[in-house]
Image (spheres, rainbow, N blue to C red):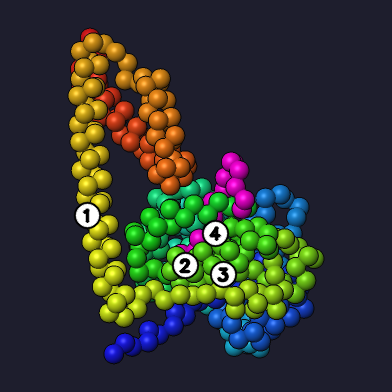
Amino acid sequence: MTSNPTPRRPLIIAGPCSAETEEQTLQTCIQLAATGLVDMLRAGVWKPRTQPGTFEGAGLKGLAWLAKAKSITGLPIAVEAACAKHVENALEFGVDMLWLGARTTVNPFSVQDVADAVRGTGTQVYLKNPMVPDVALWSGAVERMLQADVPSENLGLIHRGFSHTGTCEHRNAPMWHLIFDMRSRYPTLPMICDPSHICGTRDTLLSVSQQAADLSYDGLIIESHIHPDQAWSDARQQLRPMDLARLLSAIQWRENSTDTPAYARAMEQFRHQIDQMDEEIFSLLARRMDIAEKIGRIKQENNVAVLQGSRWSQIVNNILSRAPALRLSEEFLRTVLNAIHQESIQRQNAILNSTIPHHIP
Ligand code: PEP
Ligand code: MN
C-alpha cells in the first residue's frame, strides 16, 4: 500500500518593502492576511538606501503600524535590523522575526553587534546572503549567531541574489550553486527565497519562485504593496496583495520525495549509476592531474614557463566544438575546463616552486 505524503507547506512571508504610512502598512497587511496564504508579515522600517536624501524608513512609527497590523490580523511580524538599537526597538514593539539585510551580512562588525543584541531574547533571526558572492561571509554570520547562543531552531537563511557587474536578466544574480554550498554547510536551517530582490521586476517573479520551489526551498519572502507603482522604495518589484495571491496559487510545491516502491526502486538504480559515474569521473581527473605533474617536471627540467597559452586555447576550442554533440552548454564546459586548468597550473607551479630557494642568498 502506498501512503500519501503530507503536502509540503512552505513558509510565506509577505509585506511592503517599506512601511510608508499607517494606511499603506495596515491596508497591505490586512489584504495579505485575507488571502489566507501568508504566514508572516514583513516591512522595512529602517531602509539602507543607496543614495542619501531618499526615503530612509519610518523608524519607530513604522514599528507601531506593524504592531497594529499584528494585532488586527493575528499574524507574526518581521523587520530588517542592522544594529543593536534596531533589535532593541523591534523587540519592544513585539516583532517576532528579525532579518539581516544583504548590506548588513556583508559587514562582520554589524553582524556581531546584532548577534550580541539578540543573545538570550529568543527571537527568530533570518540572515540574507551578503551582497557579494562569498559563502564564507554568509556562513560567518551564521557562526556569529550560534556563538551568541541563538538556537539553530531560531535561525534561517534568505537567498536574495548577489550583486553583479556582468549581464544578467535579474537585478541580483541568483547564483544557485552558492546556495547549494550554503545548504550543505547548514542542512537543518530553513532556506527561503526572496524572489523580489532577485528579480527587481514583477514579470519574472513567478519563474524564480517556481525555481525555488523546485529546488526544495522552505518558503518565500515577497514584497507586496497596495499601490506598487507609488511605492517609496522598490516600486518595480512589488505586487498588489491580490496579484501576490494569484502568484502564490500558481506555484507548485512538489513533494521532496515519496515512498512509492516504484519511485524508490528507480531512484536507487539511477543514484547508483550516478555514484558510479562520479567515481569514474574523479578517478580520471586524478589521473589527468598526475600527467599534468609529469609535464610540469619536464617543463622544469627544460626551464619552460608553466602557462602555454596556445596549447590551452587548442584544448578549449577542441572541447567547445563538441558542445552540441555532447549536449552540454558552452558555459558549463568552460566552467569545468577552467577548474581543471586552475588545478593543473597549481600542481605545476608547486613543482617549479619546490626548486626555488626560499631564502635570498
Ligand atoms: C528588503 O528586504 O527590503 C531589503 C532591503 O533587502 P536586501 O537586504 O535583500 O536588499
Ligand atoms: Mn525592498
Q: Nearer the viewer, residue 262 or 124?
A: 262
For marks 4 and 2, give the one nearer the viewer.
2
Q: Earlier in the sequence, mark 3 or mark 1?
A: 3
Which residue is denoted by mark 4 in the rendering?
160
Relative side of 332 to 307, left or right:
right
Can I make out residue 80 in this image? Answer: no
Q: CA distance from mark 3 to mark 2?
A: 16 Å
Q: Secondary structure at mark 2?
A: helix
Q: CA distance from mark 4 to mark 3?
A: 9 Å
What is the x, y in percent for residue 199? 62, 58
Disc 4 within 8 angstroms of ligand 1 (CB): yes
Residue found at x 45% / y 75%: 254
Circle number at residue 276: 1
Query: Few, some or many C-alpha atoms within 10 Å of disc 3 (few <14, some 14-19, many ≥20)?
Result: many
Amino acid type, label 1 = Gln
Q: Earlier in the sequence, mark 4 or mark 2?
A: 4
Which residue is denoted by mark 2 in the rendering?
214
The magenta stretch spans residue 158: yes
Which residue of the protein is positioned furthest toward the right in this rendering?
Answer: 230
